[in-house]
Amino acid sequence: MLTSGKRAAYAALFHFALRLLAMPVDAVLEGKETRTLKKAAPSVLPVVLVVGAPRSGTTLVYQTLARYMDVSYVTNMTSMFPKSPVTASRLLNWMPKRDSADFHNFYGQTARLHGPNDGFSLWNKWLGDDRYVPRTDLNESEQQEMRSFFSAWSQAFGKPFLNKNNRNTGCLDLLSKVLPQASFVVVRRNPLLVAQSLINAREQVQGDKAVGWGLHSQSSDTTQDPLRYVDDVCDQILEIERQLDQQLKHIPADRLVEVTYEGFCENPAESLRWISGRIPGVDLKENLMTTELKPFEASAKVTLTAAEQQRLLSRLQERRATAQMAQL
């Protein structure tokens, strides 16, 4: 991250340091947070959750929705107060914010203190500390705690709640049951480019292509087979696709909005109107969209080595053929 040259990467390290400094204040605010959650009345305001495979474009979609939809969301500042997110967010809401658009990120990390955050500090309360595999067996008390949080957040800010967290892709069935007001924006992308980006993430974030990164990832010893990591990434993508498709069968169609990364980049304004139109109670900032929103340049350049590309395509074809045979 230090050698990446990315502002968002440096900011992520800075935010981590601030999180340590904020711990005493967070502890003091915890009591107030508990009382706020207990007295929160049930809310019907929408909860909009952006999901999809890691490196599929979910962060860009999240940033764009946060900019042009009239919503509230977990920020980098909020994440510094895991014990008191609602209370701290309200207290710090007075802080000045830069009003210009910023769509840069470093593997999901945004730069500004008020920039959109994945919200792991929030979701970990219920879904566990494993950043790659979520819990799916919440008891009734834990489910009620989750509902109370979103009621308290909605009451505090009076706007729909927006968040993106790729790990949540692994527990959509659970979230749809616990949060009946939740809708899901599912982002998909060319699997070859997802695999390429996951391999880059392993190298830039983990420091080693053999070390897994992201939902359902795994690590392997590449001593005997130097390209084993390509197989791991391929299996990771296909497992995410399999679980995602399986879970979507159990969620009502009127709570789902599916977009492609490529299509979103080509015409973000049309995508925003499509998403907003499918989720009642979510309004767009049309004037801001007209003033500044332009198409994004979709990253489509293949930078894999010839050996990596051949191995990846071969593995994808092999695994998909096996899955199709299993269904016969």
Image (cartoon, rainbow, N blue to C red):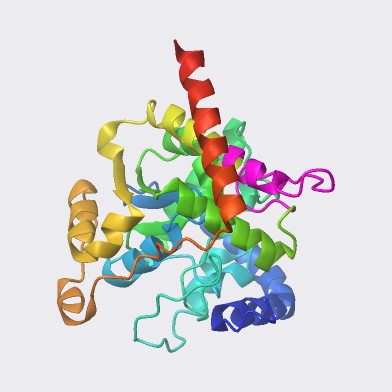
Quadrant in which residue 276 is drawn = bottom left
Using the rendered image of the protein, determine whether residue 133 is visible from the camera's viewpoint: no
| Magenta span includes 232 | yes
Q: Is residue 85 above or below residue 253?
A: below
Out of 61 and 22, give the one closest to the viewer: 61
At x 51%, y 65%, the residue is 86
How many callouts does the rendering have? 0
Q: Is residue 237 left or right of residue 100?
A: right
Q: Residue furthest front?
A: 306
Q: Residue 159, image x and y in percent?
A: 32, 62
At x 19%, y 53%, the residue is 274
Q: Is residue 318 above or below residue 53?
A: above
Q: Residue 91, image x and y in percent?
A: 51, 78
Q: Is residue 30 above or below residue 180?
A: below
Q: Residue furthest top?
A: 328
Give the main secondary structure of the magenta stretch: loop
Q: Is residue 100 left or right of residue 191?
A: left
Out of 211 and 67, give the one closest to the viewer: 211
Q: Residue 208, image x and y in percent?
A: 75, 60
Out of 34 and 281, give the one closest to the viewer: 281
At x 45%, y 27%, the residue is 246
Query: Which part of the image, by quadrant, shows the C terminus?
Result: top left
Quadrant in which residue 106 is drawn = bottom right
Q: Which residues are magenta?
A: 211-235
Query: Which part of the image, by quadrant, shows the N terminus?
Result: bottom right
Quadrant in which residue 235 is drawn = top right
Q: Is residue 168 left or right of residue 61?
A: right
At x 39%, y 32%, the residue is 248
| Magenta span includes 138 | no
Q: Residue 90, image x and y in percent?
A: 47, 73
Using the rendered image of the protein, determine whether residue 84 is visible from the camera's viewpoint: yes
